[in-house]
Image (spheres, rainbow, N blue to C red):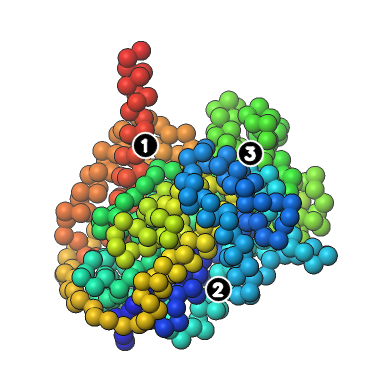
Amino acid sequence: MNTNYDVMIVGTGAAGLYTALNLAPTLRVLMISKKEMKLCNSALAQGGVAGVYHNPEDSPALHKKDTLIAGGYENRLETLDVLVNEACIDIDRVIKLGVEFDKKPDGDYHRTLEGGHGMHRIFHHEDTTGYEIVSKLQERVLELPNVSVLENAQMCDIQKTATGFALDILCGGKHETYLCHYTVFCTGGIGRVYEYTTNTAIATGDGIAMAYYLGAEIRHLSYIQFHPTAFQNHHTRECFLISEAVRGEGAYLRNCKRERFMQDYDERLELAPRDVVSHAIISEAKKTGSDEFYIDVTHLKPDFIKKRFPMIYSKLLEVGYDMTKDLVPIFPCQHYLMGGINVDTSARTSVAGLYACGECSHTGVHGNNRLASNSLLEALVFSRRAAQDINSLTGEKSGGDFTPYTFANTDSYPVIPTGLRTEIRKIMQTAYFVIPDAEKIRTGIVRIREIYDFLENGKFRKNHDYVEASSLATVAYIVLSEAQAALEPQHDSEQKQ
């Protein structure tokens, strides 16, 4: 098997697939999938893709305004301008690649509304938009003769070489060294650093940790979004998401007394941005002494609910809830990461030849809180721009020299002790949830650092368990370090008083 490539893409979600589709067909490309190709957070996205496309009533300026408000005006303006102005390019492109967005009877696209948006601008495929996009992009990628895909392959290490990068890939129980000129990380978020998350099992921050080891700049990793309406089921680590679009279509939120409460927290009620709603739920929980909360669509027409949200409706039926008749229990849980590997408008990191796209990257477009349905758009826009940049640098010509590299063989080393990942998740869940706990952050970071040093300095076998534990420890340490630094001025002020 060939182990030398022009470009290696780590991750097969929307960002990785769209990168491959936009690379020059003359370049040799290898995509690395941690598990099977379709297991990615992109495929779970329910709401849709936000963007202005053939809609004279809307404008990129209005989209920008809503994104700035949701992001607390901490958004990076340069990349945000790219996002809202180039949305039309990529919405048009994915439609031409076969993605089917829902249409109205008159043939125009149906655009829905979600929290924080002032206009109906969300393109969607029922309530399974992410799956529709990923499925269609996968079909197109698998047709490309210049692209190979390696599934169930774990990236265990990456090193910079004189001609690009060397990657240590564990596949089928064997380590293999792959060489490439350019690497694109599309490795997703960090959801599994928490006890409860909407993310899939692969979201352990591997790409962010590897980029950190390479010396890439990591920015705002503590900017973590907690989705307010995850199905309340603490019997499973992966929480089923009840889409933002449900509130967009008129759902109510109710407390343990079955009363609406958002009017006490924000004039936008249930359509306030995610961070506002999550904070409101936690505050209401403290006020009522109960974590029982519900989302209610029983006042909407049953046929509309079943047609608009067929996947959510069927999923809830499986666990005993008919959302057309029943109040559905919800509670905030970890959902998305706004920070990550810092990149520019072409998705370039501070390490030459290394790019980052999608949730693992920090483009700065989201500020401190992502506006609903901007994530799939970000993945598309900046992965296209990454591919275009690589095309310009290669002159779209394949080949060249590759500097050999040999990774240390750790197969004779012992495996890591059990329980480290569980301990990290518990610390993060209690210390840095919707409203951070200052004391638990200060104590938690000490233990996280101990785990980090133990893994970093110990001699353990580099297998799947080691990589994930090391990634989670790295991510947790960076998050809590940022959180502690943010709390220090407040702590100093309290001491002076």
Distance of label 1 from label 3 (alpha carbons):
24 Å
Q: Quadrant of residue 409?
A: bottom left
Q: Name the N-terminal-most of marks 1 and 3.
A: 3
Decide if residue 364 is in sight here: yes
Which residue type carries mark 3? Ala
Task: Residue at 68% x, 44% y: name it.
Answer: 118
Query: Which residue lies under the disc numbered 3?
Result: 272
The residue identified by callout 2 is 137
Q: Residue furthest top?
A: 497
Q: Amino acid at mark 1?
A: Ala
Seen at 57% across and 60% down, the residue is: 86
Q: Residues within 10 Å of mark 1 (few under 14, many from 20)?
A: many
Assign a secondary structure to mark 3: loop
Quadrant location of residue 149? bottom left
Residue at 20% in and 54% down: 456
- Above or below, comparing residue 216 to residue 22 in the picture: above
Instruction: Point out the tag, 3 or 2, that comes first from the N-terminus.
Output: 2
Q: Is residue 123 left or right of residue 90?
A: right
- Report how far apart the C-alphas of labels 1 and 2 lie in the structure: 37 Å
Q: Are marks 1 and 3 in contact (CB under 8 Å)?
A: no
Of the residues shown, which amino acid type is indicated by label 2? Leu
Q: Are marks 3 and 2 in contact (CB under 8 Å)?
A: no
Image x and y of residue 102, in percent: 72, 65
Gap between marks 3 and 2, in whole Å?
Answer: 32 Å
